[in-house]
Image (cartoon, rainbow, N blue to C red):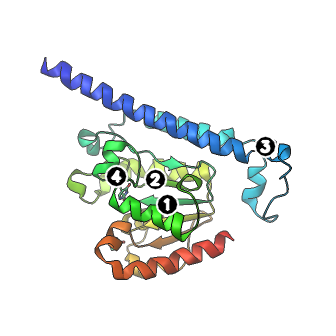
């Protein structure tokens, strides 16, 4: 009896994760459809805003593709048991946002709220990130893409361990390969370390762009760290202003 209940709980939890994921895919396809070549032709807005941007050339292709590729990647991850974090998760938190985003925010790993909802950055730190995006950058959360280094919640929000990062980072790398953003904002030590393969502290890395396979990476303080150290918010704002300037 107990086993059946446990099984049922797992089925419901994975179904919920799947439904959240499908919703994200639909939202994402809605966004891409609006930006598509055909839509721009029909609405006579074909002329690219930024003639020199590679991204713009990419964008003139019909764009169902990135969302499909992300969908396939999510399917490849499946009901992941590749590391010990799988034991404690409610939902795997894959990522959310525009599959054709020019900017991707990478955090560390899901916290409690994210684990329960299956969506990254929806708790207190998430609200601060949302404020940075909407109030600071004047963009919508749906315009950017948001994900984490590890896709499952570490117990008691401890740091992800090296074996867990090893098991999961390939999926982050593939997400970035699909989305091909111009800029990645690495939120906190783990995102910066994972992408830049450096042991320098975030305080040394922030304040300028680094390179990851041709993508500009701006490391900055993690929103959770900013909640504990609000006097550092002005530094992150400096970083974000450089990002805004680069996006044009
Ligand atoms: N902190 C993170 O690093 N990621 C989340 O998704 C939420 C909080
Ligand atoms: N330490 C962290 O882990 N993250 C920060 O953003 C700053 C210090």
Q: Measured from the top left, where is residue 141 in percent x and y?
A: 53, 55
Give 8 or 88, whichever is nearer the viewer.
8
**Quick check: 52 above or below 59?**
below
Determine the secondary structure under disc 1. strand
Judging by the rendered image, the residue that carries numbered circle 3 is: 39
Q: Measured from the top left, where is residue 160 in percent x and y?
A: 29, 57
**Quick check: 5 above or below 134?**
above
Choose mark 3 or mark 1, whichever is in front. 3
Residue 124 placement, left or right of 95:
left
Q: Measured from the top left, where is residue 67 in percent x and y?
A: 60, 40
Q: CA distance from mark 4 to mark 1?
A: 13 Å
Q: Crowding near pointer 1: few (<14 within 10 Å), some, many (20+)? A: many
Question: Which numbered disc, 4 or 1, marks the residue that appears first in the sequence?
Answer: 1
**Quick check: 17 above or below 196?**
above
Cβ atoms under marks 4 and 1 closer than 8 Å: no
Q: CB of residue at label 4: within 8 Å of ligand 1?
A: yes
Question: Which numbered disc, 3 or 1, marks the residue that appears first in the sequence?
Answer: 3
Question: Which numbered disc, 3 or 4, marks the residue that appears first in the sequence?
Answer: 3
Judging by the rendered image, the residue that carries numbered circle 2 is: 147
Q: Measured from the top left, where is residue 1 in percent x and y?
A: 13, 17
Cβ atoms under marks 2 and 4 closer than 8 Å: no
Q: Which mark is residue 110?
A: 4
Q: CA distance from mark 3 to mark 1?
A: 27 Å
């Amino acid at each position: 009896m107990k086993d059946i209940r446990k099984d049922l709980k797992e089925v419901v939890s994975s179904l919920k994760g799947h439904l959240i994921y499908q919703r994200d895919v639909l939202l994402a396809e809605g966004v891409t459809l609006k930006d598509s070549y055909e839509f721009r032709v029909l609405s006579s807005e074909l002329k690219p805003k930024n003639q020199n941007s590679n991204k713009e050339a990419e964008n003139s292709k019909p764009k169902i593709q990135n969302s499909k590729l992300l969908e396939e990647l999510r399917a490849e991850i499946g009901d992941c048991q590749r590391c010990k974090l799988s034991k404690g998760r409610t939902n795997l938190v894959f990522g959310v946002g525009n599959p054709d985003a020019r900017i991707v925010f990478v955090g560390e790993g899901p916290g409690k709220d994210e684990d329960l909802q299956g969506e990254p950055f929806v708790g207190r730190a998430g609200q601060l990130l949302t404020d940075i995006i909407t109030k600071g950058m004047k963009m919508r959360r749906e315009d950017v893409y948001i994900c984490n280094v590890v896709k499952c919640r570490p117990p008691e929000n401890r740091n992800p361990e090296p074996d867990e990062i090893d098991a999961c980072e390939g999926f982050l790398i593939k997400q970035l390969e699909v989305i091909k953003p111009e800029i990645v904002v690495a939120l906190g030590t783990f995102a910066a370390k994972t992408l830049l393969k450096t042991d320098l502290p975030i305080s040394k890395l922030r304040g300028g762009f680094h390179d990851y396979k041709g993508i500009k990476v701006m490391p900055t303080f993690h929103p959770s760290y900013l909640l504990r150290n609000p006097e550092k918010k002005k530094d992150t704002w400096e970083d974000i202003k450089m990002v805004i300037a680069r996006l044009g």
